[in-house]
Amino acid sequence: MFLNPHLNYKHFISNSSKISENIKNRNVKDANIELVNSLYTTFCNLTTQINSKRNKRNETTKLIKQTKLEELREKLVEQARILKEEIQKAELELEKVEKEMIQEGLKIPNDTHHEVIVGREELAKVIKIVGVPLDSTQKGGNIIKDHMTIARELDLIDLESASNVTGTSWYYLRNAGALLELALIQYAIYKVISKGYIPIITPDVVKTEYSDGCGFQPRDGEISQNYFVITSPIGSVETGNNQEISFTLTGTAEIPLAGIYSNKIIPSSKLPIRMVGFGRAFRAEAGSRGQDTKGLYRVHQFSKVEMFCLTSPEESEEMLKEIVNIQEEIVKDLGLCFRILDMPTYELGASAYRKYDMEAWMPGRGKWGEISSASNCTDYQSRRLNIRYKPSLSSSNESTNDRVKQKQQSTEFVHTLNGTAIAVPRMIIAILENFQRDDGKISIPEVLRKWMGGMEFIE
């Protein structure tokens, strides 16, 4: 089943100035709300013209059947033929306009929460800091090692073999490094399902339209971060038509989790829906040169546990708080020093209405490093994936007519939210660098030990 985006063009027209300012504030260069509105106006005018001509042709067809005068019949047949040609020509133009309208409409980013700061990453508002960043003075002046130095000494990571087998920014986890990944995944899954989330193992390959529908498409001429699978022609037995399907390796489990409910209507009684998915994340562009490419910080593939929720519009802000609270519990359980940031407009991407990042202190790097994020995407993704819900009937003492009208009301789009529970490589960095001991051992966070056979130290 192919996706048909349901963009809110009436909202675009009614809020054109506000949206234009939002595009500027989010630093989106290739979105043009004036063009989208112009295309929508043309689309509506063409639709009206086509419907008018169809009605006229139907009336002409009826007259042809009714008339007995041959001369008049010939004139009517000619009129019907001309109308048919005009309709076909207009339909081709309508198809062309609609395609461009959707293409340009998909570039329009989500609205932005009024409290979000306008600007670049460095303007992010620090909501809170938990713990004290580790430095050499807390270790009696001893040198703090970075995670790659530790990993080499303890034989935890093999970048050299991965470079030969696959390429740069790929890696093998070995020995306690492999066990640490599995422990982090198990811990995160059980932590989140204890909060009422449904555990799901997701596919790591999706149709590209689902990735695009979630907002994971390049913008402003950027290189795509997606890995694409060779397209496969899908043929229809009935029609013989072939359509090429593009497949993508997932950048996050958020994408296949969102896809579960695409083109579906959810009863309001089922909301909110809370899911936690495990999958591999693939990023073709591993980052710019420099320290951020060293070791595990920016890699092409990593394991990730992701929370994903569907709510009514009224519930989404509270759900975002719930997700951030779970993330905070996880990092506290691991004993890390961290901070929570309310991210500015340049960092929201296409889909987020509001986004919080969580950064752990990484003493070996000597700076904070992002370990998770949480976003409220409102109806941005649900309109592109066609995920709706039907509001429940009111239980108030309304008249029968009012209840019938309410029952017949149209469906509404859900709000979608996502949040990282664990992104493994960066969490491994934080653990190795924060819990290194003077004797060369690494203290394993207590909550992970049962998943590592009772080990207390990596040595």
Image (cartoon, grey):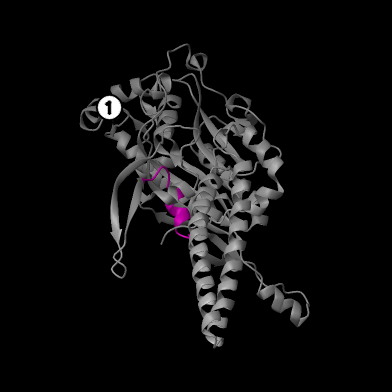
Q: Looking at the rendering, which quadrant does residue 347 occupy?
A: top right
Is residue 113 something one can see in this rendering? no
Instruction: Report the label total.
Output: 1
Q: Residue 422 at what x, y percent from top left?
A: 45, 41
Q: Which corner quadrant holds the N terminus?
A: bottom left
Q: Looking at the rendering, which quadrant does residue 164 occupy?
A: top left
> Which residue is found at the position 35% from the left and 52% from the top?
203
Q: Residue 214 at what x, y percent from top left?
A: 49, 48
Instruction: Please tell me whether residue 407 belongs to the stretch shown in magenta.
Output: no
Q: Which residue is mark 1?
A: 159
Note whether 39 is above or below 77 in the view shown.
above
Depth check: 44 or 211 in front?
44
Q: Residue 201 at what x, y percent from top left?
A: 38, 54
Note whether 233 is above or below 157 in the view shown.
below
> Which residue is found at the position 29% from the left and 23% from the top?
152
Depth check: 337 or 105 in front?
105
Q: Which residues are magenta?
A: 249-262
